[in-house]
Image (tube, rainbow, N blue to C red):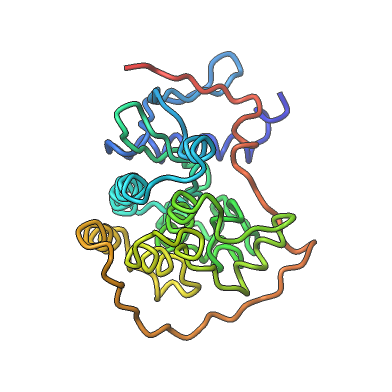
Amino acid sequence: SKAASDKEVVARFQREANLCAKIKHPNVVGVYDCGLDRGVHFLTMDFVDGLTLAAVVEEQGKLEWKEAAGYIIQIARALEHVHGQGIIHRDIKPANILIDDQKVAKLADLGLAKQVDNDEASGAGLTMQGIAMGSPAYMPPEQIRNAKEATHLADVYALGATFYQTVTGVIPFDGKNGTEVMTKVLREEAAPAITHVPTLPQGVSDLIQSMLAKNPADRPQGAAVLIQELESVLADPVRPRARKRPAARLATRKVSQTGVAIVIIAAVLAVALVVVLVRH
């Protein structure tokens, strides 16, 4: 097929398999093998008997905050491990989080992931200079401006947007199209989650807001710190979170209709690439 013969598509497919194969963690969907069989590229991975977090939220509207926090802290633990391998996910969202029948959350889809050392050493990798790659509603400002600028703190932001949607039922920023959403991400502040759910504990709302900080320096500084803050909130959700003085704002750049390309990895990998699911 056209997709299977496209060198960039195949390279992304192979990279996802190679990155996933390095990661062994109970909160990450495991990959066992990949290859080419009679002209068909295949990926053998864990079968997760459950739903995506997106489907769960769609069914229920929103989740009770303790249930949501339980899923978020599991993904934070997955990120701590992933980041420890020098990998940045760059596309965390409810559709890429699977919830099995035992309420175990698993991070999936490393199709846009970046291995820091390899990408920086090559000077090119598979990320195009100046192109925004990811899902607009969950991308932080720095990733919108240039995917190469995304660090592990971009994943903290995306997980914050996911937490926000899970407890409120809405995304932090919405719009008629991806460009409008990204413009809002760059220029506007998200309404605190507590404005959508008045019964949400103040400490939970404050933590979510800190994860959505425009400046990476104002977010929890890594997955380990985020885990500690989540544990603190679970223990005492009412206590307001101490706010840091905001760091200097990152300069915003105008996003034009023609200046931003949105690359959705699901479309890339879904076309003519066969995924073999293995039940355990």
The x and y percentages for residue 167 are 44, 52
Q: Would residue 16 be seen by someone viewing this image from the given angle?
A: no
**Vertical side of 218 occupied by 137: above or below:** above
On-image quarter of the C terminus: top left
Residue drawn at x 63%, y 44% as measured from the top left: 264
Residue drawn at x 36%, y 66% as measured from the top left: 207
Residue drawn at x 56%, y 23% as measured from the top left: 41
Give the quarter of the image for residue 277.
Answer: top left
Give the quarter of the image for residue 99.
Answer: top left
On-image quarter of the N terminus: top right
Q: Would residue 214 be seen by someone viewing this image from the given angle?
A: yes
| Furthest residue toward front | 199
Left or right of 208 on screen, residue 179: right
Left or right of 155 on screen, residue 174: right
**Residue situated in front as seen by the camera: 96 or 99:** 99
The x and y percentages for residue 15 are 49, 40
